[in-house]
Amino acid sequence: MSALLEAQDLHASYGGPAILKGISFTVGEGGITTVLGANGAGKTTLLRAICGMCHRRGRVRFAGQAIENKATEDVVRLGVAHVPDGRGTFLHLTTEENLRLGAYTRHRDKTGIAHDLERVFGYFPKLKERRKQQAGTLSGGEQQMLAISRGLMLRPKLMLLDEPSFGLAPLIVQDIFRIMRAINIQDKVSILLVEQNAELALDLADTAYLMETGQVVLSGPAEQIRSDPSVRKAYLGY
Amino acid sequence: MDALLHQVFAGLASGGIYASLALALVMIHNATNHINFAQGEMAMFSTYIAWSLINIGVPYWAAFVATIVISFFAAAAIERILIRPVEKAPVLTVVSVFIGLLLILNSVAGWIYTYTIKSFTSPFPSEPPFGNKFVSSHELGAIAIALFVLVAMYLFFRVTPLGLAMRAAAENPASSRLVGIRVGWMLALGWGFAGAIGAIAGMMIAPLVYLDPNMMAGIMLYAFAGALLGGIDNPWGAVIGGFLMGVLENVVGALIGTELKLTVALVLIIIVLLLRPNGLWGHKVVSRV
């Protein structure tokens, strides 16, 4: 599997202390990579560093291009959909407007957008029911579905997902993870998933990284990480 | 009765101007959470540009369009050059910049054009339309143009992808960048629109109040009041508030005399705002967490 995204010795901060202290990782073309770690390990910052949402230093290549100096909008325009921490819903706009914004970079492609709307409604029928509803009135789970769908509307090559399970009921989480796998296989979208729910994330991913205080402490195929005794004890609880 | 009707039409005409300026205020407020205190002076300066063009022999409507275009780019440039550096500054810093801009535009206009009042042509015939005795052609024309601007802006924001992107950038800049919207340019665009709308309002009010560097002081007071009355975050509310202010001003003026008309209008507004602090149609955000 060749690398779609490759970071080398990436440092990041918000102007104060360093949050990422020189980490390297890759996301394979068509693959799912997960980054695990406790609160404050720097997982969210890692995703933000890829998209230019914080100060960063180091090398990041996406689909053969250096992106470490690109502005957020330009990284997105290359085909990187970031489903952010907190879901990033446009609360005052309707569900459908939120989705249309996801396709903003190709807003002239009317038929393509209509087609993609139907496709995400196929994944998440709830969103179709809520189509004309103000997005701020959606439940947490629906807003997470909306955030993933908004990312899909970009027709991305790579999706960055920031704790999609956060604060959701277990059944909804299972649903969302099932659809993420479908997105990966059917839509051929590579995924970089940041999660605290190690169990689910390791099920889904092919490659895993374990982060502690801004550094990668362990990495390898997901199967291997799952059977690592220290991971089992600290993250899986058995 | 005739006198009252006449006052209502005159009120709708100035109300259309207040509504346009209120809309310009809402546009910048929704994009940046700032109240552009220099909005009136920008409109005044635009009107002087139109006056200069007409004075050198440019036909009225050509000057009208040229002024709108110039004002659009000038306002967008003001955002890029003056406002952007203080984007993240404390609110008082931003207010100072706005007041500075107000004073600069006012005194530069006075320096170039002097403080003597100038008459400004109306593009509409001087006889009232259809021989009626309630409303002059200019008043009717000003109402029509104000309504046209308001509907055009509404359609732009509701129907076009760019309008949607501007609303998104105003609401959630971080998420907007994540869908590829160039947020900085959306703000400049919002300023450009505000400048253009202000220019139209200035050119419509100037034939009624004459052109001088201080012409907008009283008008902006009504526009602010209209925007606050209707709801500073709701374009429709601000527009209706602007029209209400115009009618209120004229009817109150006719009933109890011109000395108190501003006072009575403002007292009414204070009462409304005491009862409904967000304005009559201001948004209460519905959200679940």
Image (cartoon, coloured by chain):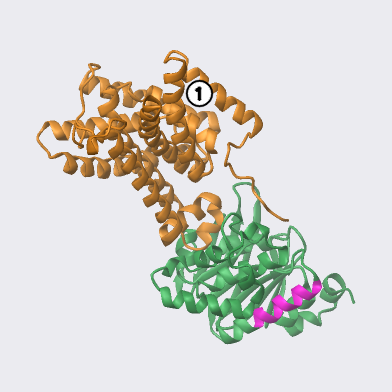
> What amino acid is found at the position of numbered circle 1 in the picture?
Ala
Q: Where A180 sits versus A78, above or below?
A: below
* Secondary element type, mark 1: helix
What chain is the green one?
A: A
Please tell me which residue lies in front, A90 or B281: B281
Horizontal side of B212 relative to B249 (left or right) equals left
Mark 1 crowd level (few <14, some 14–19, many ≥20, 10 Å Cα): many
Span highlighted in magenta in the image? A170-181
Seen as rendered, the residue at the extreme top is B259
Tell me residue A181's x, y (percent). 66, 82
Specify whether residue B5 is painted magenta. no
| Quarter of the C terminus of chain B within the rendering | bottom right
Q: Which residue is at a point 10% across and 33% down the rendered structure image?
A: B56
Q: Where B163 sits versus A35, above or below?
A: above
Q: Which residue is mark 1?
A: B265
Q: Is residue A24 visible?
A: no
